[in-house]
Every structure is written in structure tokens, then in C-alpha cells.
Image (spheres, coloured by chain):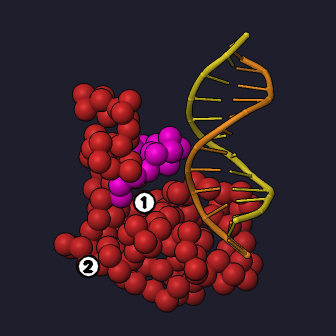
Chain colours: A red, B yellow, C orange
Amino acid sequence: MNYWLMKSEPEECSVDDALAAKNATVPWVGVRNYQARNFMRDGMQIGDGVLFYHSSCAEPGIVGLARVASTAYPDPTQFDPQSPYYDAKSKPEEPRWVLVDVQVLEKIPNITLPALRARPELADMLVLKKGNRLSITQVEARHWQAIIKVK
DNA sequence: GCCAACGTTGGC
DNA sequence: GCCAACGTTGGC
């Protein structure tokens, strides 16, 4: 069992959007970074814990608890010329990008970036590292536990 | 809108 | 394989 933090722009898919979806489950479309893709493809298992994070917004932070709800499968948006995530170089017989389904279990009061930084036990979370742009990072069990306690 | 950080691309 | 240029992310 692993834990992850997954960033989503609320304008794209907020925690409320995800909660409103069928079974509170959304396909995590649009990841176009190999490291993040590899986490989904090779690292994630159904049932893994997910911290739902809002990025590129007024109050970035952790806004929900979720779980990995599927194994990895091809991201359909890579084949859709209308999609901003379209990738002309990806072939259906050899898809370049995959995704997993993410199911929100609980919306929590926003644990903002400043609030995360204020907690010494969370200080070395990957998402808080300077220059971190990765949309999916692994979360250590101790960090997960601390956040469950704080929420 | 600015800018630091970092990933990707492409010429050589 | 190197590395400069360029593009993107994301906090502020």
C-alpha cells in the first residue's frame, strides 16, 4: 500500500467536481510527464491513498482524501485532436500516456501550503520542496498519518 | 504578470 | 552524448 499526492487545477477538476462525478470517481486525464506517468503505471495499486491537491489557484493545498480506484489504462485524451492533451505522436496501438481512476472519499478543510510548511513533521514532504513541479509525488506513510491527524 | 526551477527538444 | 534554447509549472 502506497500513498500519493496528486495535483489538480480546480478550474480543471476540483475536489467538488470529483465528488459530483459518478461514484465520486474521475479519470486522471492529462498527465504528460514521464515520471508522473510511471508512478501511475508502475507504482500505483487499487486502494492506494491519495491526497487531492489543488494547484495553480488562490489557495493551493490539500483539499481531499481519495483512493486509487483502477489500475493504469490509456488516457483517451491523447488521441483526441480537440483535446488540449492531444498528442499527435501517440498511437492507439502503442499509447504513450496512461491514467488511473481516482475516487474521492472525503473532502477536508483546505490544508494550505503555509499550513503544511508550518508543521515540522511535514517539512520534508516532496511537494514542499523548492522547484517541485511534479504533478504526482509519493507520500511517506508518516506524512500521511500526520495529515490524517491534522485534517 | 513575474520568475525560478526543471523537463524536453533538437542541432551538432 | 552534450548543452543551449525553449516551454511549462506553479507559487507569489
Tell me whether marks 2 and 1 sit on the same chain. yes
Q: Residue A59, image x and y in percent?
A: 58, 81
Q: Residue A119, image x and y in percent?
A: 71, 81
What stretch of residues is rendered in magenta? A28-42
Instruction: Give the residue drawn at x 65%, y 77%.
Output: A113
State the quadrant of the N terminus of chain A: bottom left
Q: Please, is residue A25 above or below residue A86 in the view?
A: below
Q: Please, is residue C6 above or below residue A150 in the view?
A: above
Q: Quadrant of residue B3?
A: bottom right
Give the residue pinned by disc 2.
A20
Would residue A105 be found to the left or right of residue A51 on screen? left
Instruction: Give the residue drawn at x 60%, y 71%.
Output: A143
The amino acid type found where label 2 is placed reads Ala
**Residues at marks 2 and 1, CA–CA distance in whole angstroms:** 27 Å
Query: Dot 1, how many residues are within 10 Å of its Cα: few (below 14), some (14-19), or many (20+)?
Result: few
Total tally of numbered discs in the picture:
2
Q: Residue A73, image x and y in percent?
A: 28, 45
